[in-house]
Image (spheres, helix red, strand yellow):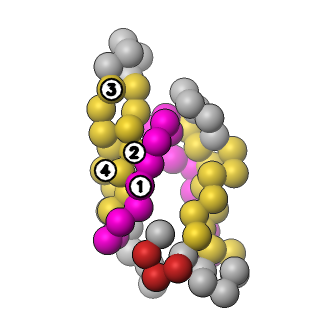
Amino acid sequence: MENNYLMVIRDGRFRQNALIDIFNPQGRFIIEKRLTFFLKDSLCSRGKFYSIYEDDEGYLGIKLYSYKLL
């Protein structure tokens, strides 16, 4: 992630709602969050979290979430 923050996918595989942890640049734990969508591939950039997901019928799409590091 930007500003040297680290996002770790702690519990999540394809077709699961991932549990993520975020750490600050000093390695201090910031937040734990369960995502509301299935995680396949993802990218964090400029306050946006992009993820490719597959719906129940097998169609691929993109989820976009905004985030703010305080």
Q: Disc 4 marks which residue?
A: 64
Q: Distance from label 2 to label 4 (Cα)?
A: 7 Å
Total numbered labels: 4
Q: Tell me where residue 47 appears, x and y as whole percent.
A: 34, 70
Note whether residue 32 is visible.
no
Q: Disc 2 marks which residue?
A: 51
Q: Distance from label 3 to label 1 (Cα)?
A: 16 Å
Mark with earlier residue (1, 4)? 1
Mark with earlier residue (2, 4)? 2
The amino acid on which the numbered mark 2 sits, given as a three-letter code, is Ser
- Which secondary structure type mostly characterizes the magenta part of the structure? strand
Compared with 36, 27 (above or below) is: below
Q: Tell me where residue 25 appears, x and y as whole percent.
A: 60, 84
Q: Quadrant of residue 54?
A: top left
The amino acid on which the numbered mark 4 sits, given as a three-letter code, is Leu
Q: Name the mark on residue 60.
A: 3
The amino acid on which the numbered mark 1 sits, given as a three-letter code, is Leu
Give SS at disc 2. Answer: strand
Find out whether the residues at labels 2 and 4 contact each other: C-beta distance under 8 Å: no
Comparing 52 with 19, the one in front is 52
Find out whether the residues at labels 1 and 4 contact each other: C-beta distance under 8 Å: no
The amino acid on which the numbered mark 3 sits, given as a three-letter code, is Leu
Q: Tell me where residue 3 appears, x and y as whole percent.
A: 46, 82
Q: Distance from label 2 to label 1 (Cα)?
A: 7 Å
Q: Distance from label 4 to label 3 (Cα)?
A: 13 Å
Q: Quadrant of residue 26?
A: bottom right
Mark with earlier residue (2, 1)? 1
Q: Disc 1 marks which residue?
A: 43
Find out whether the residues at labels 2 and 1 contact each other: C-beta distance under 8 Å: yes
The structure residue drawn at horizontal position 35% and vertical position 66%, both measured from the top left corner, is 45
Find out whether the residues at labels 2 and 3 contact each other: C-beta distance under 8 Å: no
Compared with 38, 26 (above or below) is: below
